Amino acid sequence: MLRAGEAIQIPQDVEAAAMNDPVIAEIESLLRWQHEHYGDLREGEVADYIPELTKTPADLFGIAVTLHDGRTVAVGDASYPFTIQSISKVYTFPMLLDLIGREGIYSLVGVQPSSDPFNAITLDPRTNRPFNPMVNTGAIAVAGRLREVLGPNAFEAILDTFSRAAGRALDVDEKVFESERQEGHRNRAIGHLLRAAGVFHASVDEVLDLYFRQCSVLVTAEDLAMMGATLSNLGAHPVTRDPVFGLEAVRDTLSVMFGCGMYDGAGDWATRVGLPAKSGVGGGIMGVVNRQLGVGVFSPRLDEVGNSVRGKLCCIHLSENLGMHPFDATNAGSSFFSAISGRR
Ligand code: GLN
């Protein structure tokens, strides 16, 4: 268990090696380019359906990349804390999978992209279960089962898991939590729909409190990059080596992120960026390159489907320039690409 204020230390030899490393230098120049070229963009709106979120300064912009061995590059407002929101779904899903196994979790929630907005009040008509764990119906179903399995301490367990994935003790923004608790009527409707469909049997209010709390955990772009790197590193934290998630859980999480992580923008994302990724209405996007790295971007202005406008541009740019799309083999010339492929 991590305690507040306990930060992970990147070993000095790793830090020193990073300074002369061409891969790090290349990533750093890309992140600087993005910060300069996308910094003036004012497109998109800060989410306002959770009133407290409107208080976030709209033009903050931070980008971070963490390699699977913990080396990190960060630019801009990468240590500014904001609420994780839907990116929390990426971590409660493998947590529950590790607790109840595949059979248990797939009787609760599917793995199909829904083509609906993240907050749609619908179930898959074929199964009467949520389409997938990356939309609200699925994530609230997961929260419901976590509440049933872990009892009243479920939130402590969730916060501990998120903290282990980040490698530092995370905290909750109580104001954002209260704000969504007051105004989250669509999510309450989803809770009652799930309860009526027999997806969970716990109290709707308790399950929603758990879900709203998990969404209100404060992270930074650097945390998201590290949490992504934990998934990229087979579920073990790159620096602490803490095995946070099991291998099956990581495999399935990255798969549903790939297909369903970017809501109804998922197909466009899979084609343009090609990374398993997840966005949140707090302005965060977290992406993963399996066995290689995690990306975290924070920029609160969102597009019409609820993805960070600059965050999406950064991920496209990074993917194109580092040859990160899984089906892309055209980017010879990148030192990152050649280090992996042996091509020049
Ligand atoms: N807490 C938000 C909600 O449930 C999370 C949504 C999101 O980040 N897309 O509506």
Image (tube, rainbow, N blue to C red):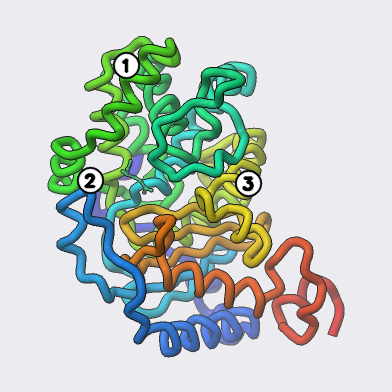
Q: Are marks 1 and 3 in contact (CB under 8 Å)?
A: no
Residue for badge 1: 151
Q: Residue at x 64, y 85 (%)?
A: 22
Of 20 and 150, which appears nearest the observer?
150
Looking at the picture, how far across and down is residue 279, in whole percent? 44, 55
Looking at marks 3 and 2 on the same chain, the residue that comes earlier in the sequence is marked by 2
Q: Is residue 198 left or right of residue 181?
A: right
Of tags 3 and 2, the one toward the viewer is 3
Quadrant for the C terminus in the image: bottom right
Position above or below: 237 against 247: below
Q: Residues within 10 Å of mark 3 (few under 14, many from 20)?
A: many
Position above or below: 110 against 216: above
The secondary element bearing badge 3 is classed as helix
Looking at marks 1 and 3 on the same chain, the residue that comes earlier in the sequence is marked by 1
Marks 2 and 1, how far apart at CA: 19 Å
Quadrant for the N terminus in the image: top left
Looking at the picture, how far across and down is residue 230, in whole percent? 54, 51
Looking at marks 2 and 1 on the same chain, the residue that comes earlier in the sequence is marked by 1
Amino acid carrying label 2: it is Val
Q: Quadrant of ligand 1?
A: top left
Residue for badge 3: 259
Residue 170 is marked as: none
Looking at the picture, how far across and down is residue 283, in whole percent? 35, 61
Q: Under 8 Å from ligand 1: the CB of mark 3? A: no
Q: Residues within 10 Å of mark 2 (few under 14, many from 20)?
A: some
Residue for badge 2: 172
Amino acid carrying label 1: it is Gly
Q: Residue at x 78, y 63 (%)?
A: 327
Q: Residue at x 66, y 76 (%)?
A: 320
Position above or below: 36 against 337: below
> Looking at the image, can residue 68 be seen?
no
Q: Are marks 2 and 1 in contact (CB under 8 Å)?
A: no
